[in-house]
Image (cartoon, grey):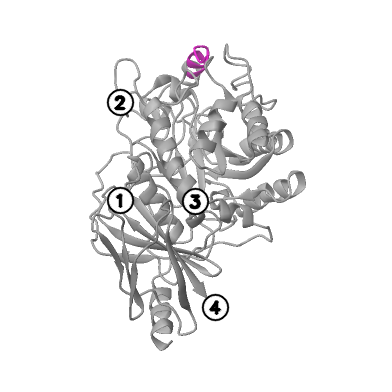
């Protein structure tokens, strides 16, 4: 017992700490869901990473190529995603085992992907498509039983003349080619004229379960609180992430990385399937199903959710390889999902036998592309638990037996049963002190090689 207390004390010293003021809101559904689909879709999807014969751009193409707003209106005239099918998109998420969906309602270019009365710069009024994809997706999510959520760029809007920035220089992340007078930009005018009305539209007109803000920018504490007050007024219970700004929000959102230890506070890691958030023609190398499942199990073992991003094409489709990879992870979850959904972290998140080195490429676009996630497949162990059950996840295991050095069980806890999810036969196992040695059946070869042992415990 003393050893267990020592392990917990040592682990507590390395836990992440968040500067966050929690709301009194029920987060059970979100914390039980674990896995969501993120989709960045907008005019940058039409451009696809190439502008006037030059490539190398991502979803920040308007900023990096300094595209005037009037030319973005011309791009909008070519945006006609006639192959978009909301039910098909939602079925992709369901087949992948995802429990909620977050889509960009307005990214940094200021273009609304829904019918906004607050700005004509939107997909219904400015494009030949003339439909509201957010309404169709919201209805489809209700039909298929997953939660509909929306992203909204708070502190950046390159269509609006009053949104300034001071990072990494004055005007460094705002539209200073159309609107160069940074000193006379007034964020409060944008906040009242466009931002608040659009947030109210989203809350009133769609069944939103999470309002996922991005880039707080010059948003003041009172403005952040005003947005939370709007949520309380129009959609009580809707969750808000930390990017509403100023230490507020219900959960924190590390981007393109996974934290190093367990956090019992709500957190969600947002990660791309490829290199970019939106559709980019050159972005064709995706994380494999094994790597995706490893990321998910790592995050869940540490108490977090994974919001996994795929950038839809300008035609309204998903890249076939992305669909295939997500379905394979969904197949793994059909067998092993009980070790993911509704679980909580164990006393430690796992046992590592090989520390992976993560290579981070230097970039001159420091907030555009930074993938710091692990992509190796070295064998290791992760843990999750439910009352009376400990799950041991042997990731990318290659040996005929799985050995756990220390389960950290108390003297009162006894193992009363061991089974391997997806395998109908009996599992041979041997207890070694407070560890366990379990057979990995030679003939069991799932497509995604993460093996989940279910240890039933007496309490």
| Residue at 30% over, 25% down | 282
Horizontal side of 374 relative to 137 (left or right) equals: left
Q: Residue furthest right?
A: 233
Where is residue 438 shown, x and y percent of the image? Answer: 33, 66
Percent coordinates x, y for residue 199 in the rendering: 66, 38
* Element type at mark 2: loop
SS at badge 3: helix
**Which of the 4 image quarters holds residue 45?**
top left
Instruction: Say which quarter of the image contains residue 292.
Output: top left
Q: Are marks 1 and 3 in contact (CB under 8 Å)?
A: no
Disc 2 designates what residue?
282
Q: Image check: 159 left or right of 383?
A: right
Seen from this angle, which residue lies furthest front?
A: 425
Task: Say which mark, if any, is on residue 337.
Answer: 3
**Residue indicated by mark 4:** 459
Q: CA distance from mark 4 to mark 1?
A: 36 Å
357 to the left or right of 372: left
Report the magenta residues as a range: 72-80
């Amino acid at each position: 017992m003393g050893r267990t207390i020592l392990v917990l004390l040592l682990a507590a010293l390395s836990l992440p700490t968040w500067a966050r003021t929690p709301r009194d809101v029920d987060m059970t559904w979100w914390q039980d869901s674990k896995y969501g689909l993120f989709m960045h879709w907008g005019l940058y999807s039409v451009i696809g990473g190439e502008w006037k014969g030059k490539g190398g751009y991502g979803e920040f193409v308007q900023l990096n190529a300094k595209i005037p707003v009037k030319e973005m209106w011309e791009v909008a005239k070519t945006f006609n995603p006639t192959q978009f099918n909301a039910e098909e998109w939602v079925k992709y998420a369901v087949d992948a085992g995802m429990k909620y969906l977050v889509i960009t309602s307005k990214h940094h270019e200021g273009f609304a992907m829904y019918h906004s009365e607050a700005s004509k710069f939107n997909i219904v009024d400015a494009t030949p498509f003339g439909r509201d994809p957010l309404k169709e997706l919201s209805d489809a999510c209700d039909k298929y039983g997953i939660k509909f959520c929306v992203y909204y760029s708070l502190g950046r809007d390159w269509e609006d003349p009053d949104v300034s920035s001071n990072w990494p220089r004055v005007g460094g992340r705002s539209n200073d080619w159309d609107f160069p007078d940074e000193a006379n930009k007034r964020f409060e005018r944008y906040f009242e004229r466009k931002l608040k009305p659009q947030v109210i539209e989203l809350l009133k007109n769609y069944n939103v379960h999470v309002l996922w803000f991005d880039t707080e920018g010059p948003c003041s504490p009172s403005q952040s609180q005003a947005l939370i007050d709007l949520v309380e007024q129009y959609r009580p219970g809707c969750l808000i992430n930390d990017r509403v700004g100023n230490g507020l929000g219900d959960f924190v959102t590390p981007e393109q990385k996974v934290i190093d230890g367990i956090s019992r506070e709500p957190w969600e890691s947002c990660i791309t399937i490829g290199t970019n958030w939106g559709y980019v023609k050159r972005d064709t190398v995706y994380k494999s199903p094994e790597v995706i499942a490893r990321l998910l199990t790592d995050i869940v073992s540490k108490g977090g959710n994974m919001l996994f991003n795929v950038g839809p094409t300008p035609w309204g489709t998903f890249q076939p390889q992305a669909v295939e990879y997500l379905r394979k992870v969904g197949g793994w979850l059909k067998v092993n999902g009980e070790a993911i959904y509704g679980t909580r972290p164990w006393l430690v998140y796992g046992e590592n036998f090989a520390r992976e080195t993560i290579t981070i490429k230097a970039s001159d676009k420091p907030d555009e592309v930074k993938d710091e996630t692990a992509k190796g497949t070295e064998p290791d162990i992760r843990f999750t638990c439910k009352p009376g059950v400990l799950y041991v996840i042997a990731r990318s295991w290659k040996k005929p037996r799985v050995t756990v050095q220390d389960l950290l069980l108390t003297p009162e806890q006894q193992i009363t049963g061991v089974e391997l999810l997806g395998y109908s036969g009996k599992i041979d196992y041997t207890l070694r002190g407070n560890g366990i040695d379990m057979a990995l059946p030679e003939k069991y070869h799932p497509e995604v090689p993460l093996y989940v042992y279910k240890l039933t415990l007496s309490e």
